[in-house]
Amino acid sequence: MDQGSRNAAIAAAVILVGFGLAAYFLPTLIIWIGGYSTIVAAVVAAAFVAAFFLLFWWRGRSRGGD
């Protein structure tokens, strides 16, 4: 494994762990936000899902993988 592949694998692992931790606490956060506004809670949940895919899309695009 060369240095570039190793760095990419480490970055992907950090992103996945970060999103995994956020997903673990997401239901609690959504229920808390839903107590104030169900629309805002839905927007936060949708933004979380979109951010996961957009982050990897942006990272791939910035590395010239498009």
Image (tube, helix red, strand yellow):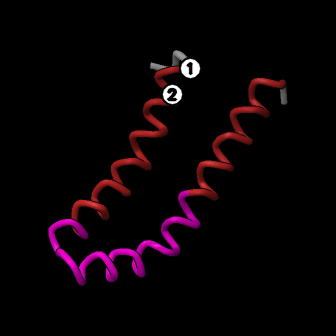
Quadrant occupied by the N terminus = top right
Give the CA distance from mark 1 to mark 2: 5 Å
Q: Furthest residue to the top?
A: 64
- Residue appearing at x 43%, y 72% in the figure: 26
Secondary element under disc 2, as helix, strand or loop, is helix
Q: Are marks 1 and 2 in contact (CB under 8 Å)?
A: yes
Q: In this view, does 35 lie to the left or right of 17?
A: left
Image check: 6 left or right of 31?
right
36, 64: nearer the viewer? 36
On the image, numbered disc 1 is attached to which residue?
Answer: 63
Image x and y of residue 56, in percent: 48, 38
Residue tagged 2: 60
Provide residue 25's location: percent of width, then percent of height.
Answer: 50, 75
Q: Is residue 20 magenta?
A: yes
Examine the image and state in which quarter residue 46 appears. Answer: bottom left
Q: Residue at horizontal 79%, vertical 33%?
A: 6
Q: Which mark is residue 18?
A: none
